[in-house]
Image (cartoon, helix red, strand yellow):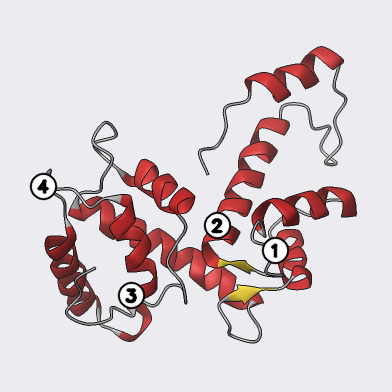
Amino acid sequence: LKLSACVCASAMPDADKAKQIAAAFEANKGANGLLPPKALAQMAKDFGFSPTTFGTKTSEWLVASFDSHPAKGGLTLKGLQGCLDYVMEWKGIFEQYDIDHTGQLDKLSFNRAMADLGYGVGLSIFDSVWDTYDADRSGSVTLDEFMQAISELNHYKTYFAQYDNGAGVGALSFDAYCKIAFTLPHPGV
């Protein structure tokens, strides 16, 4: 990835940040004029959003979310700017729980973040979520894993709302459960 300087969004005036992002976009765009997911993955590290590159799944999800050209699989400069702003919002939330400033959340911090954000679940469900997003079994989740987890939980919670009685409890028939299990679109994260 070609960067003239590290873009640390929180330490740079907006005009300078925009110039750095534009320069990075120009240096890394593909032949189709779009920024591919692989370049976005590296930018997460080089821009100071994460101590590591974002995973392929996260980068592809972000590109799909901000791509004004879905069939082409890349970001325009405007899409990149929106994507990086979105990641900065997530980073701000993430950092509230990253108390040791390692760029990773341990299991307790991740559980606390989920609960504080309105996604508190029972222990067995939490363990399943943890096992899914700590797939490398490192004992921690990174910013991109955190973004994926909360986005997926939000997707499912939004769908569940039609069955909710207002107290986070809903009655489902077996047919309704099967509809959720077999037809709920995957959130793409």
Q: Name the residue under label 3.
A: 46
Give whichever of 165, 63 is nearer the camera: 63
Kind of residue sitting beneath label 4: Ala
Could you tell me which residue is drawn at 85 percent across and 30 percent down? 170
Q: Would you place residue 20 above or below residue 82 in this image?
A: below
Task: Please give the label number shown on residue 137.
Answer: 1
- How would you rate the neighbour count of disc 4 (Cα within 10 Å): few for under 14, some for 14-19, many for 20 or more? few
Could you tell me which residue is drawn at 37 percent across and 41 percent down? 64
Q: Is mark 1 on a helix, strand or loop?
A: loop
- Image coordinates for residue 17, horizontal then vertical, percent: 23, 75
Q: Which of marks 4 and 3 is nearer the N terminus?
A: 4
Could you tell me which residue is drawn at 33 percent across and 77 percent down? 9
- Side (left or right) of 146 relative to 71: right
Q: Verify CB contact (< 8 Å) between mark 1 and mark 2.
A: no
- Image coordinates for residue 78, horizontal then vertical, percent: 21, 53
Look at discs 2 and 4 and give the one toward the viewer: 4
- How would you rate the neighbour count of disc 2 (Cα within 10 Å): few for under 14, some for 14-19, many for 20 or more? some
Distance of label 4 from label 1 (alpha carbons): 37 Å
- Image coordinates for residue 140, horizontal then vertical, percent: 67, 70
Kind of residue sitting beneath label 1: Arg
Q: Earlier in the sequence, mark 1 or mark 2?
A: 1
Kind of residue sitting beneath label 2: Met
Q: Name the residue under label 4.
A: 31
Q: What element carries label 4?
A: loop
- Side (left or right) of 146 relative to 89: right
Identify the image quadrant of the N terminus: bottom left
Q: Name the residue under label 2.
A: 147
